[in-house]
Amino acid sequence: MSNSQGFQNKIIQKNSVGKRDISDMIGNRMLILLILFFFNTDCLAQNGTPLLMGRSEILHSKVLGEDRMINIYLPDNYNPNDSVRYPIVYVLDGGIDEDFFHIAGIVRFSTQPWIDRFPQSIVVGIGGNTRRRDFTFPVENTDFIEKEGFQKASFPSYGGSEKYRTFMKKELIPYISGNYKSNGKQTLIGESLAGLLSVEILLKQPELFDDYIIISPSLWWGEESLLKRAAKFLQGNLKKDIKVYLGVPNKEEDVRMYDEAIALSDILNNNKKIHFVFDYMPDELHSTVIHQAVYNAFKKLYPKTFYSK
């Protein structure tokens, strides 16, 4: 007898106590079975093998005056005792709740033996919840923030990019190079405000990285002041050949950001020391572009025949 039938009989029949008891007994037994099922499932889960994607470390920064979470993906065949060394891919928004996992996944996919697009690589994700402070340079006036659709209160602190660049150059990169088997080749990935910082590093300290993957950069910061000085910065600072990928989402979402990216691409494309790739993705938005852009960047910057076997 179903619970619904028992409930109806309880209302209609005065002598329905026995039927209700049978229904309760069935319900209690079902509850016991469910408890046993979930208990056993939990036990099985605890006895399973953990699925690991990387490791996390705390790096204390004297420059920033705080601890930073560093997330690290190592290739499957990484062996600290052999002589093999690896390129390093740095991800600015590299927290476990940001871009670390899916960027590491793209790297792992692209370096599988049946794809072999570029060498096995180490991925370093830099975590933190102060990106608006760390990824922006100082400005004298913040009125432009509201013109861009933000409230000034959403930027309680800003202008810390110089310290952050120093942290990367003097603390993070030496730490990774000293504790992991780096071959000296370094790639930087940044999107949105992290893309802004990537552009600033490219223009002011281009020697820090060999390859730059810049996605939908927030060049509106400081009323485009970085963009306006881009050509001058490159002329004075770029001493070696580098690769730069610039990925941009649908221009209809934000025409100004698209126009800024086009202006930057003209400057980069005219520099003989830069192997430059511009990638317009009309099917992507600012919020969705990073995954497709990084995948495209690996294909365009690192053709399969680039590295000798």
Image (cartoon, rainbow, N blue to C red):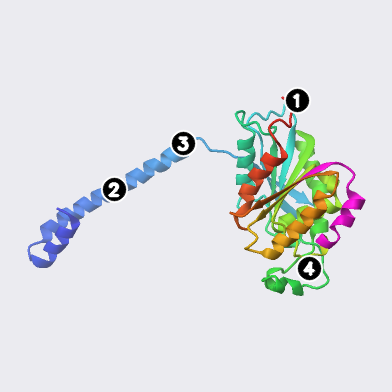
The answer to whether residue 6 is above or below residue 73 is below
Please tell me whether mark 4 or mark 1 is closer to you in this view: 4
Place of residue 268 in the rendered image (x, y in percent of width and height, measured from the top left): 81, 51
Alpha carbon distance from label 3 to label 4: 56 Å
Which residue carries the number 4 mark?
Answer: 223
Q: Quadrant of residue 110?
A: top right
Residues shaded magenta? 227-244
- Residue sitting at x 62%, y 28%: 113
Q: Residues within 10 Å of mark 4 (few under 14, many from 20)?
A: some
Which of marks 4 and 3 precedes in the sequence?
Answer: 3
Amino acid carrying mark 4 in the image: Glu
On the image, numbered disc 1 is attached to which residue? 83
- Give the foreground label among 3 and 4: 4
Name which of mark 1 and mark 3 comes first in the sequence. Answer: 3
State the mark number for residue 32: 2
Q: Which mark is residue 207?
A: none
| Residue 131 pos. (x, y %) | 71, 59
Q: Residue 198 lies in magenta, yes or no?
A: no
Q: Is residue 99 visible?
A: no
Q: Secondary structure at mark 3?
A: loop
**Amino acid at dot 2:** Ile
- Give me the residue at 65% from left, 31% from top: 116
Give the spatial CA distance, label 1 vs label 2. 57 Å
Task: Measure the C-alpha gap from mark 2 to mark 4.
Answer: 65 Å
| Labels 1 and 2: the sequence-earlier one | 2
